[in-house]
Amino acid sequence: MRSCVRTASSLLQSWRARAVRPNGLPIPARSLEPSVLLARSYAQAYRAQSDLEKRISEIPMERFRNFCIVAHVDHGKSTLSDRLLELTGTIQPGGNKQILDKLDVERERGITVKAQTCTMIYNYKGDDYLLHLVDTPGHVDFRAEVSRSYASCGGALLLVDASQGVQAQTVANFYLAFSQGLTLVPVLNKVDLPHADIPRVLEQIKDTFEIDPDTAVLVSAKTGQNVAALLPTVVEQIPAPVGSLDAPLRLLLVDSWYDVYKGVILLVRIFDGQVKPGDTLRSFATGLKYIVGEVGIQYPDQTPQTVLRAGQVGYIHFNPGMKRSQEAKVGDTYTTVGSEKLVEPLPGFEEPKSMVFVAAFPTDQDKHEYLEESINQIILNDRSVTLQKESSDALGAGWRLGFLGTLHCSVFEDRLRQEHGANIIITPPSVPFKVVWKDGKESIITNPNEFPDQDIAHLKVQEVHEPYVLATITLPDEYLGEVIKLCESNRGEQKELTFFTATQVILKYDLPLSHLVDDFFGKLKGATKGYASLDYEDAGYHRSSIVKLNLLVNGAPVDAVSRVLHTSQVDRVGRSWVEKFKEHVDRQMFEVVIQAAVGRRIVARATIKPFRKDVLAKLHASDITRRRKLLEKQKEGRKKLRAVGSVVIEQEAFQKFLSK
């Protein structure tokens, strides 16, 4: 045993004697102490520079380009990203389609839900350029992802479909990018389609955005036509990032996601200095310290590096890992410990606000814990979902979830079902209402069950406000009458009507959010045969006449089914509710009365007749008084039964009633 110890110590001494740095100088003895070596290996094992990293290290910051692709939904962003990755040799051509769409639901629906990033190396005129690409979502619900992406970029490719032309989301993304000072490069996609109208779309770009149509690049992402001309345009037109390698580290947290083994992984943009494994960083927002475990770039998957420099966008994770995704506040600034007073934090982002709320309940209460775990796992990678516990007498324990919009809610539900095999009941979407009480206090109510009933409201509530949105609708002029009729029937107020070409109209309306989440988009597509597009932004709260509609079964309210509505909708919704619920409730031994009520006012009523024994079957030619006596006796028995019996409504009835 002693000889083994002596051998180990003699080996350590001989290794210390031979230990030298790459420049030939010996490593100080203090750095080779076992405690120091252990601390360093805990953060990150030594990693030799790869050929890729050597190539990146020779590229100066003047040859970095950070850009994103923004467009309306389904204009071909992800396909164009694939072509650019193939051209730069980042992925093999002809392989997996839409490489940056990583979620099953993204591939299935053909939409981008989460902004995805990738680094590329492009050789232009004999020089290597480091390009960083962000493929952003196109749907209005994921606007927060787009605005986050802009913070890490110096420019954007404004992609327009050559057959559909400028759409609502194109307009919204243009103004968002323009307000942040990004350099915009117009790109026309799908020019190979037989019904592509290039002159008309170029004219739209000129009229709507005041961009010179001669600067537009005409491409077909699907066939690869002229995509090669796009990269030189990016290099020449989009500016290089600004920053200093010698200044103290300053990095911005752009996005985060959760890894089971590594903890929270941060996507960061380095503004000044550099970061490498073993560095100790401090967050300005939380004040917490972390030791960097690994740094790297997305190429297209996570590729570890020995250092990230100013101007680069890459990922970092800590060792020990960051366990709680709540600590990763998007828009936060990080710097090395000791440099806090030398660094000015970068202006942060606003946290996205939930605008649509639903209640979710497991179909089987035994699966409650499993479903809670599944929901928490998805929320780790989707910071914009809010979650709080809720319970219902009818449906048991569940959760109230807040989303950015109805598509966001639908995607979340699909992910729960596909990735976790969950069986859930989702209530109809509701929106937050602002209640101003007579004592001057204000409160935002997201749960219809907490909304004051009519009896209490007139005593304690001064006024109720509901959220409105400014909706921008682009459509062909032939459908203008139908769309105006649709907006007016949904309590809309017209703000603007512009013909931006001879046949295309931009219509702006202030609409109540509660109507927008009630399948307004589906009705709009139906009225315009799919040619209209919609974008919206928050327009604050407006005072309104709002009441709570309850569903009563034999006089008792059903807590899982209550809605907060404008008074103009109460009669229509009440009647349809009663008829629909009646279909799913089983007959009982006594009469069941279903009512829709606002306070004490009954809006609609339906009666389910009881099972009835034929008490007159044994009578033949008896007199009328005998018959009447038996019927009266039966009626008295029914009253007693109704007084002591309670209506048993199967959970399946609620599932069918709440299903669309």
Image: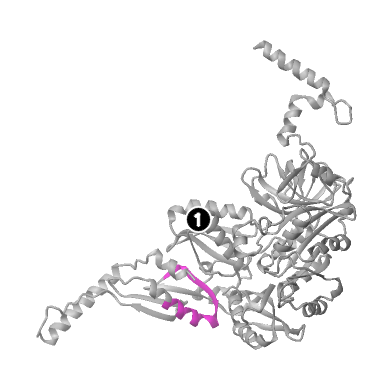
Residue drawn at point x = 47 percent, y = 69 percent? 658
Where residue 353 sits: x, y (%)? Answer: 66, 64
- Figure disc tally: 1
Which quadrant: the N terminus?
A: top right
| Residue range highlighted in magenta | 557-579
Question: Relative to the observer, which residue lies in front, 18 or 268?
Answer: 18
- Badge 1 crowding class, 10 Å Cα cut-off, few under 14, some 14 to 19, many 20 or more, is few
Residue 466 shown left or right of residue 557 in the figure:
right
Residue drawn at point x = 54 percent, y = 57 percent? 418
Can residue 559 be found in the magenta stretch?
Answer: yes
Q: How is the image coloured?
A: one colour
Residue for badge 1: 421
Residue 148 shown left or right of residue 437 in the figure:
right
Whether residue 72 can be seen here: yes
Where residue 73 sits: x, y (%)? Answer: 68, 69
Question: Relative to the observer, which residue lies in front, 173 or 57?
Answer: 57
Can residue 283 be found in the magenta stretch?
Answer: no
User: Which secondary structure, mark 1?
Assistant: loop
Q: Which amino acid type is marked by label 1?
A: Gly
Query: Residue 643 appears in which quarter of the rendering?
Result: bottom left
Residue lying at the far left of the rendered structure: 621
Whether residue 349 can be seen here: no
Where residue 117 sits: x, y (%)? Answer: 73, 55
